[in-house]
Image: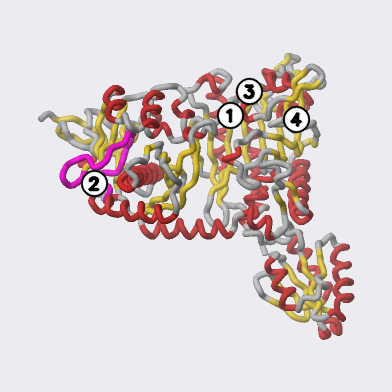
């Protein structure tokens, strides 16, 4: 056997190694039991490989640990295969759809005669454990289209996927389809049992774990209906969701987070706290805010409006609809047509509900001549927009069809762009901190060069815009995570990914660099030398969507808003009816200070009133009895159960006023 040279990358160490031909990747990392796969190559040209991959001369090979993001995907994809094997063992007539890894888990779609029930999931889990215990080996083999079509003749959905292989639309043809077919060679994975036989096989690109024994902890979560390839015109399949983790402790921690998330579900809390609802009569994804929810929404709007003014923005207003030509100028038609509601014909023209505010801000900029002395020109509004989201993705306030954006656009010279992006980053990070979100990182979304028809502009324009955003992000000192292919069609963007109180990550504020719309609208300003120049347009949304941000806040705080946002800041509770007038007078004084106070003069007993205030998550309670009235004081009770008796009225008012003014997280 001859010798070849490879570069082994492991634990931040690069080491040139000489090995013999036929050496497998696992031999490089045999000493580390956490390694489950290998990444071969560097940069965008690298790819994930099974540990059984045979090394070639000059390969750069990095380890993939089970606890890494790539490792999680491989673990979960492998577990999805085990689940599908178990399903077909128990339900031999089940036909296979697709089974990709997803955030924190995996799923697999099946065509079965009757929907799965919880008892079925229990049986499937039991069978999966037997497969895992057997230590079946995942074995990759290359096949031809013809051979695969013959071998999978009884799997109609796999046959359909093979027909998509190599097509430009395979990524969009079915969610997760790319884990099975792609532009390269076609492969099948066999699960090899102890007898050396293929116990089960599936069309798949891989990679996978070495054996099923490398699956430490998993759980099947639920089943649901799902249309094949996400198209409502197709047959409805049964989807089983599961999760898998590198240790039993990690699985238990995940399940605890899910339990906590269920308690914090903003849809449930929205009902319990009487904040908002979704009347069927209005339509799916179109929320209405009740008085208490309206208080929170107004406080958010007042805050962000004032902050925009302080940061140099001018408030503007634009209509909800526009002639279609506006969206042709912006490029949204045809690039974004599927995300917009159908047009309405009126007076011989097509009108669209706006899905974004930027085209109309461009028309404000273009309404008269502009000078470089006016730049940066910053425009801002609460623009209500409408997007045609599919019914399957609508989720409470966090995914709706009608919502208000705190939408702003900065028009700057190219030289001003870096400074403006830094200015906007500082703005949004400060805003998030004021709302109690202070654990975040940045994500840089760039163009997918393999899909040039989905993006406008030259490579030079994209490179320049991306460099400007990347530099500003790096100077912020925050972690920067790449998001290849996630850019808008008109330019790259940076988004703030914030963690909530239970560690979930939410995409919050966004900043986008746009070189397309200024050209489409022929925006110009007069430069210092008298020439006409094109400005750079920078989009920024601090909340993104007021509705979505509110939904996130409800879950972050579990409904227990800090005093400045709480719909009711103080609940006044008389020990007996005789003390109601006293508390009404205290409430009047508080209201003069701008505080939101209610007096509970119902027939309920005092302890029931306290309990009601706790259920409504009111930050402060003021309780008054005979001793309090005699002393001109109140018993001051906090949401967490602490209580100070005999607090003078002026001091009680000062405590609440200070907590509101400082945005204290009580």
Circle on res. 377: 4
Location of the N terminus by quadrant is top left
Q: Is residue 406 left or right of residue 451?
A: right
Residue 400 in the image: state x and y as whole percent.
65, 41
Q: Quadrant of residue 409?
A: top right
Q: Secondary structure at mark 4?
A: strand
Q: Is residue 150 above or below residue 653?
A: above
Q: Secondary structure at mark 1?
A: loop
The residue beneath circle 3 is: 515
Depth order, front residue of 126/45: 126
* N-term-proximal mark, 3 vs 4: 4
Q: Are marks 3 and 2 in contact (CB under 8 Å)?
A: no
Name the residue at 62% across, 36% down.
389
Residue 289 in the image: state x and y as whole percent.
75, 50
Depth order, front residue of 279/293: 279
Q: Is residue 411 left or right of residue 188?
A: right
Q: Is residue 158 above or below residue 589?
A: above
Circle on res. 136: 2
* N-term-proximal mark, 2 vs 1: 2
Instruction: Give the class, few, some or many, for how many residues have Cα within 10 Å of label 1's Cα (few <14, many ≥20).
Output: some
Q: Nearer the viewer, mark 3 or mark 4?
A: 3
- Part of the protein shown in magenta: 193-213
Residue 286 lies in the magenta stretch: no
The answer to whether any part of residue 235 appears in the image is: yes
């Amino acid at each position: 056997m001859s010798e070849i040279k490879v570069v082994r990358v492991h634990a931040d160490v690069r080491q040139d190694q000489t090995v013999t031909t036929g050496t497998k990747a696992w031999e490089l990392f045999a000493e580390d039991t956490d390694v489950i796969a290998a990444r071969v190559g560097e940069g965008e040209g690298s790819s994930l490989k099974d540990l059984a991959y045979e090394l070639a001369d000059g390969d750069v090979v990095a380890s993939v640990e089970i606890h890494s993001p790539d490792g999680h995907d491989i673990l979960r994809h492998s577990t999805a295969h085990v689940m599908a094997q178990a399903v077909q063992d128990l339900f031999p007539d089940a036909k296979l759809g697709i089974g990709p890894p997803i955030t924190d888990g995996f799923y697999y779609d099946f065509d079965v005669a009757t929907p799965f029930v919880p008892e079925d999931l229990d049986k499937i889990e039991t069978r999966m454990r037997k497969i895992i215990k057997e230590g079946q080996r995942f074995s990759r083999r290359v096949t031809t289209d013809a051979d695969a079509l013959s071998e999978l003749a009884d799997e109609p959905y796999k046959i359909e996927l093979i027909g998509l292989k190599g097509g430009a639309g395979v990524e969009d043809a079915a969610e997760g389809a790319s884990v099975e077919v792609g532009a390269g060679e076609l492969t099948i994975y066999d699960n090899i049992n102890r007898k050396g036989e293929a116990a089960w096989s599936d069309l798949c690109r891989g990679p996978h774990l070495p054996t099923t024994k490398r699956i430490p902890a998993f759980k099947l979560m639920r089943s649901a209906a799902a249309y094949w390839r996400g198209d409502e015109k197709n047959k409805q399949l049964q989807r089983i969701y599961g999760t898998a983790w590198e240790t039993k402790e990690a699985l238990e921690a995940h399940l605890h987070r899910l339990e906590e998330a269920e308690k914090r579900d903003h849809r449930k809390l929205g009902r319990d706290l009487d904040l908002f609802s979704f009347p069927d009569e209005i339509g799916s994804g179109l929320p209405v805010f009740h008085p208490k929810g309206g208080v929170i929404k107004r406080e958010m709007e007042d805050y962000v409006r004032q902050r925009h003014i302080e940061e140099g923005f001018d408030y503007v207003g634009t209509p909800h609809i526009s002639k279609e030509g506006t969206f042709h100028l912006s490029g949204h038609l045809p690039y974004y047509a599927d995300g917009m509601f159908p047009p309405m014909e009126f007076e011989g023209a097509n009108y669209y509900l706006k899905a974004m505010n930027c085209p109309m801000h461009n028309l404000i900029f273009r309404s008269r001549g502009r000078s470089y002395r006016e730049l940066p020109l910053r425009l801002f509004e609460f623009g209500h927009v409408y997007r045609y989201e599919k019914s399957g993705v609508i989720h409470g306030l966090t995914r709706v069809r009608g919502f208000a954006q705190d939408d702003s656009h900065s028009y700057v010279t190219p030289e001003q762009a870096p400074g403006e992006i830094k200015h906007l980053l500082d703005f949004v990070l400060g805003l998030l901190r004021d709302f109690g979100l202070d654990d975040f990182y940045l994500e840089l979304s760039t163009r997918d060069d393999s899909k040039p028809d989905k993006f406008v502009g030259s490579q030079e324009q994209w490179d320049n815009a991306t460099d400007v955003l990347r530099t500003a992000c790096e100077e912020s000192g925050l972690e920067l995570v790449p998001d290849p292919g996630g850019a808008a069609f008109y330019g790259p963007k940076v988004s703030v990914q914030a963690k909530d109180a239970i560690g979930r990550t939410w995409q919050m504020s966004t900043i986008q660099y746009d070189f397309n719309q200024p050209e489409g609208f022929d925006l110009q300003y007069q430069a210092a030398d008298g020439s006409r120049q094109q400005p750079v347009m920078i989009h920024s949304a601090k909340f993104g969507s007021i509705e979505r941000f509110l939904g996130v806040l409800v879950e972050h705080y579990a409904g227990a808003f800090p005093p400045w946002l709480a719909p009711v800041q103080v609940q006044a509770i008389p020990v007996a009816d005789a003390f109601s007038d006293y508390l009404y007078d205290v409430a009047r004084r508080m209201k003069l200070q701008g505080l939101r106070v209610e007096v509970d003069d119902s027939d309920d007993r005092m302890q029931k009133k306290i309990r009601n205030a706790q259920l409504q998550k009111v930050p402060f309670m003021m309780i008054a009895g005979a001793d309090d009235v005699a002393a001109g004081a109140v018993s001051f009770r906090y949401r967490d159960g602490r209580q100070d008796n005999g607090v003078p009225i002026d001091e009680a008012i000062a405590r609440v006023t200070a907590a509101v003014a400082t945005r204290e997280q009580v």
